Image (tube, helix red, strand yellow):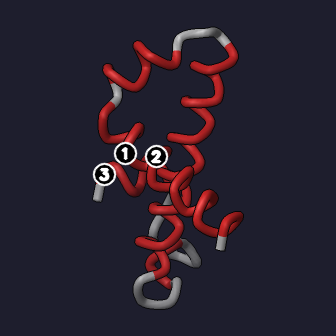
Amino acid sequence: MAWRIERWGDPWGGGWMDWPAGMIDKVTAAQNVYSAQAAYQQAVTSNNSADWTKNNPAAWKIVADIMELRRKKKHG
């Protein structure tokens, strides 16, 4: 709960506790995807992708899954 408050702000009084059921999980997942992709892109830009993938296995899994989904969409 503390992590969610830090990330999304006050949960009550019009905050995320008033969101539809399951919405906080969806936006958290979307934020995790965005963060992983942005961090990977920064690693690629700085020529550090090999070290980044080794040091960030959970984020790399997200990025690799997205790459696979994009590949499948492109090639049908």
User: Most extreme residue toward the bottom, as rendered?
Assistant: 20
Q: Mark 1–mark 3 contact, CB under 8 Å? A: no
Label of residue 18 in the image: none
Q: Around disc 3, counting alpha carbons within 10 Å, would you say few (fewer than 14), some (14 to 19), or many (20 or more)?
A: few
Residue type at the position of mark 1:
Lys
First in sequence: mark 1 vs mark 3: 3
Please tell me whether mark 1 sits on a helix, a strand or a loop.
Answer: helix
At 56% from the left and 30% from the top, the residue drawn is 39
At 50% from the left and 90% from the top, the residue drawn is 20
At 55% from the left and 30% from the top, the residue drawn is 40
Residue 46 x, y percent position in the rendering = 64, 10
Distance in Å between CA atoms under marks 1 and 2: 5 Å
Mark 1 lies on residue: 61
First in sequence: mark 2 vs mark 3: 3
Please tell me whether mark 3 sits on a helix, a strand or a loop.
Answer: helix
Mark 3 lies on residue: 2
Q: Mark 2–mark 3 contact, CB under 8 Å? A: no
> Vertically, is 58 above or below 11?
above
Please tell me whether mark 2 sits on a helix, a strand or a loop.
Answer: helix
